[in-house]
Image (cartoon, rainbow, N blue to C red):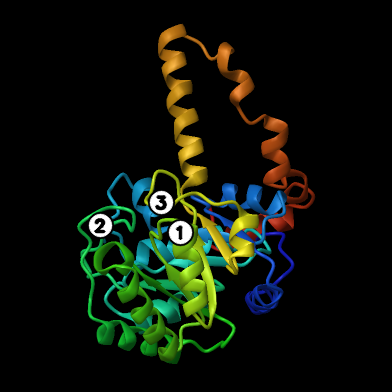
Amino acid sequence: MHFTKKNSSEKRVDLKNKIKSNKILKFPGAYNPLTAKIIADLNFDGIYISGAVMANDLGIPDIGLTTLKEVSYRSNQINKVTDLPSIVDGDTGFGNCEKTIETFEKLGLSGCHIEDQIEQKRCGHLDNKELISINEMVKKINTAVKARKDNNFLIIARTDARDVEGIEKTIERIKAYEEAGADIIFPEALVDEKEFELIRKKSKVSLLANMTEFGKSKILSSKELENLGYQIIIYPVTTQRLAMKNVEDGLRAIMRDGHQNNIIDKMQTRKRLYELVEYEKYNTTKKKITDFKTDGHD
């Protein structure tokens, strides 16, 4: 049992209305439910659930090894602990776009993006990616649009064409994906402001920008992207990178010093943790704890 107020339909309507406002929406990536609660507590606009982060968390590379079962299970956990809308990375559709969209919609997510790489995909900011044809991707988008029951569930088409075929071919693909019914276009690995601006001029629908670190894209501020006409920014791996760097540094300190006294100030306090997990609310009645356990948790 979670202390959230909004149902999935309300989350989707809220997101769609915010997109129409033309104010840039910031979606940090959450690699677990507790991170999602921090994102909500800090008043971000939504939560992004990255396929790369999911793979990393399992200790494997982001090359299409994760399954719909794994991603949907974790996405459900992350999505249901806050009132924020969540967008999930659907990779290439896990071999069945219809089932993928139906699964994510049923779990209450607010949108899903599917990319135009081959099944043996690679991270969008690595070299040597391979794409499916425009026609194949159009079929995937058509299938995804038909599969959803709630029209407010966002179908996001990601194209990795910039790094493979160049900017003009990217624009050709974007136009085809819009015609196929994509609600939002996600142009991956654009290089700089000029390319972001060009895509905006050539596109008719809302746009999502990926501001990942150590990638091919110049990191632009939210204000810059808002001025360029983008509606959503994702920061897919940021929280995981922050956490893992601090975990590694902290463990090195313990190995070196034999204790953690020198790194206490880098740790989340017990008080802050209990605030985030709403310890007192869960502790108010035995019934809430019992309900939570009978809801499939132990």
Front residue of 273/139: it is 139
Q: Position of residue 46 (x, y in %)?
A: 62, 61
Q: Earlier in the sequence, mark 3 or mark 1?
A: 3
Badge number at residue 101: none
Q: CA distance from mark 1 to mark 2?
A: 18 Å
Q: Indicate the amino acid at tag 2.
A: Ile
Q: Earlier in the sequence, mark 1 or mark 2?
A: 2
In this image, 187 relative to 43: left or right?
Answer: left
What is the quadrant of residue 290 in the picture? bottom right
Badge number at residue 53: 3
Front residue of 265/81: it is 265
Of all residues shown, which one is farthest toward the top? 257
Badge number at residue 74: 1
Q: What secondary structure is marked by label 2? A: loop
Q: Indicate the amino acid at tag 1.
A: Arg
Local crowd size for mark 3, using a 10 Å CA cut-off: few (<14), some (14–19), many (≥20): many
Circle 3/circle 1 CB separation < 8 Å: no
Q: CA distance from mark 3 to mark 2?
A: 12 Å
What is the quadrant of residue 50 in the picture? bottom left
Q: Position of residue 105 (x, y in %)?
A: 51, 78
Badge number at residue 63: 2
Q: Position of residue 153 (x, y in %)?
A: 55, 80
Mark yes or no: residue 21 visible.
yes
Local crowd size for mark 1, using a 10 Å CA cut-off: few (<14), some (14–19), many (≥20): some
Name the residue located 48 percent from the left edge and 64 percent from the top edge: 196
Mark yes or no: residue 46 visible.
no
Vertical comparison of 250 with 201: above or below: above
Q: CA distance from mark 3 to mark 1?
A: 11 Å
Vertical comparison of 4 with 103: above or below: above
In this image, 126 relative to 281: left or right?
Answer: left
- Mark nearest the camera among 1 and 2 is 2
Q: Position of residue 198 (x, y in %)?
A: 47, 70
